[in-house]
């Protein structure tokens, strides 16, 4: 992909500090979610069911337990992926002068979008073309 010329106002130092704070807050929340999800699928691992229950080994219960473990693991994996995106965004914010600019069209990504999706590398218009 050829280099795209940045268009629009530069991101100020104050804006960079603001987005750093936004990313760090989202990272903190993601790490809490990861720990919660990890505990959830570890606590629901086979053998952790109540063994004294009359229904501990009923096929429906075993299936439900397996489904809940799988769901918790998928949520855990999703949060881990989100954390990776946030870490990359933090790195870009610190080292890349093009943070906050769409890598397709070069337009400045609106602050509102960066508030909600600080790890984005595309403006809404270009992202909607990709998806």
Image (cartoon, rainbow, N blue to C red):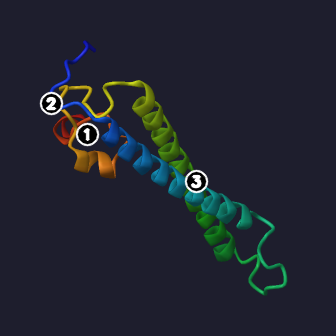
Image: 73 above or below 51: above
**Disc 2 packing (10 Å; few <14; some 14–19; many ≥20):** few
**107, 61: nearer the viewer:** 107
Residue at the location (58% across, 53% down)?
A: 31
Q: Which residue is mark 2?
A: 8
Image: 77 above or below 126: below
Q: Which residue is mark 1?
A: 131
Q: Is residue 72 left or right of residue 88?
A: right
Q: Is residue 71 left or right of residue 41?
A: left
- Where residue 89 appears, as percent x and y from the top left, is 43, 36
Q: What's the distance in space between the residues labelled 1 and 2, CA to CA? A: 25 Å
Q: Closer to the observer: label 2 or label 3?
A: 2
Q: Is residue 116 left or right of residue 37?
A: left
In contact (CB < 8 Å): disc 1 and disc 3: no
**108, 33: nearer the viewer:** 108
- Quadrant in the rendering for residue 73: bottom right
Q: Which residue is mark 3?
A: 31
Q: Is residue 98 left or right of residue 22?
A: left
């Amino acid at each position: 992909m050829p280099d795209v010329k940045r268009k629009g106002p530069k991101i100020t130092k104050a804006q960079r500090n603001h987005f750093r704070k936004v990313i760090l807050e989202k990272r903190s929340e993601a790490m809490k979610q990861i720990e919660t999800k990890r505990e959830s699928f570890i606590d629901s691992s086979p053998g952790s069911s109540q063994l004294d229950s009359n229904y501990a080994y009923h096929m429906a219960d075993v299936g439900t337990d397996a489904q809940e473990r799988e769901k918790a693991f998928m949520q855990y994996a999703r949060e881990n992926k989100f954390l990776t995106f946030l870490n990359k965004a933090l790195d870009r914010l610190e080292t890349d002068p093009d943070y906050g600019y769409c890598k397709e069209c070069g337009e400045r990504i609106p602050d509102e979008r960066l508030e909600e999706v600080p790890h984005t590398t595309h403006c809404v218009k270009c992202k909607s073309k990709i998806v």
